[in-house]
Image (spheres, rainbow, N blue to C red):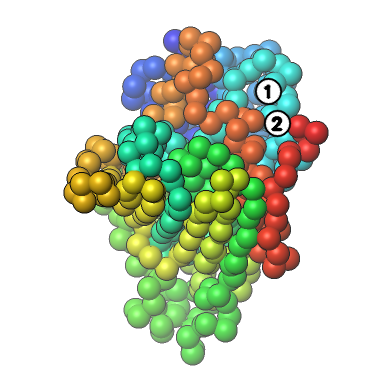
Amino acid sequence: MVTLAVIGAGLRGQSYARHALETGRARVVAVAEPDPLRRASLAAQHGVPPDNVFADWRELLDRPRLADAAIIATQDRMHLEPAVRAADLGYHLLLEKPMAPTEADATAITEAADRNGVLLAVCHVMRYTPYTRALKALIDKGAIGQVMNIQHLEQVGWWHQAHSFVRGNWRSEAESAPMLLAKACHDLDWIVHVKGGLPERVSSFGNLVHFRPESRPAGAAERCLDCPAEPTCPYSAKRIYLDCLGDPGKEFWPLSAVTADHTEEGVLTALREGPYGRCVYAGDNDVVDTQVVTMEFADGTSATCTVTAFAALEHRKTRVFGTHGSIEGDGILLRVHDFLTDKISVIDTGAEIDASAAGGHGGGDGSLLDAFVEAVATGDPTLVLTSGNESLETHRVVWAAERARHTGTVIPLGKAPHHA
């Protein structure tokens, strides 16, 4: 059985570890996590021996290799050092997205995996869903002819934006990453995967429009629990988090990010004292709440990706327009229009309804871990759909889009520096 070391026992690390336990395909034998409650909880759940439980990843990686593979699920800006050190020790790597905030760091991780001959799989879980596999198969077999345009919509979700990108760990570009990298590197990677090639030119527009002090209701307080506007505010932390109680999925995410005490008193204490109870218009967030990316490919065709906070948290919606037909997809169903017959067929891909992290991203989380574990067990890297080098290329599309957004220009993608 494949053995795993979990470096970072936050919600993503816990999700992959839990799937390994549920399927029995892999076993967690070591964990490094600074939060004592999360560290103890994961160790107990997986029966990790006390000698293999660490508060700091450096302690784990100062030891001889303890497992076949390491799950790197630390905060975004903390990926580089543990990933490179683990690769140098011979661990295969399952690396949470984004790979790293900068191209230099992401390249260093990729190079470390290459020089040590270890597998590097990046957690672009959307590639692994049954929905994506079905859509990709239709396009690859020419069901709609040449793909001329892709329109893709990422509905972050109004409360998810408030949770992660206004109040949470990803609210500050300097402390984490741009919104496009932290959230939507999934989406640009997915578009490239579906299209079957990288764009040549990229442009982008996006701003922080709504979650600013200027939008604050008159008389609003610093915290939702003290605020006279709370009953009529869609972003009320009191409503968002108290509504999680009693729902196991929502208690795991987003509530576990707020507090480990899943009682009404525990939630109210966290909202009174912690960051998740603050007004969304308090002003210490700076990542965008809406962004559009336009891509042009070598064959003259194009794609757009819209990322917006102001929608329900649902599966991504996509329209693919081809020379012989078109496809509309909602993350579960594919509606295929054949121009030759003028007939429309609907394909149920069997994807899971829940698009959120609590639901495993429509089945993508579990399928990714299964593929990675099988690749490690068999030594077959082709089972991984998101290699380090390929993911680095699609991350470069994100960085190009951010340069385009900041400079108001169209950015040619060009050749990657590490290929020069």
- State the image coordinates of residue 80 (x, y, percent, origin top left): 71, 35
In the rendered structure, find residue 77 and report the number of the disc placed on it. Answer: none
Mark 2–mark 1 CB contact (< 8 Å): yes
**Residue at 35% in and 62% down:** 312
Kindly identify which residue carries mark 2.
Answer: 109
Q: Amino acid at mark 1?
A: Ala
Q: Amino acid at mark 2?
A: Ile
* Image quadrant where residue 266 sits: bottom left
As drawn, 376 above or below 212: above
* Image quadrant where residue 138 sits: top left
- State the image coordinates of residue 103 (x, y, percent, origin top left): 72, 43
411 with respect to 311 (left or right): right
Locate the C terminus and report the quarter of the image it occupies.
top right
As drawn, 272 above or below 348: below
Near-viewer residue (132 or 357): 132
Q: How many marks?
A: 2
**Residue at 59% in and 67% down:** 206
Kindly identify which residue carries mark 1.
Answer: 113
Confirm whether residue 206 shows in the render. yes
As drawn, 253 above or below 143: below
How far is mark 2 from mark 1, CA to CA? 6 Å
**Residue at 40% in and 33% down:** 140
**Residue found at the very far right of the displayed protein:** 420
Quick one: label 1, few (<14), some, or many (20+) residues within 10 Å? Answer: many
- State the image coordinates of residue 91 (x, y, percent, origin top left): 62, 18
- State the image coordinates of residue 166 (x, y, percent, origin top left): 54, 64
Quick one: label 2, few (<14), some, or many (20+) residues within 10 Å? Answer: many
Q: Regarding mark 1 in the picture, which secondary structure is present there? A: helix
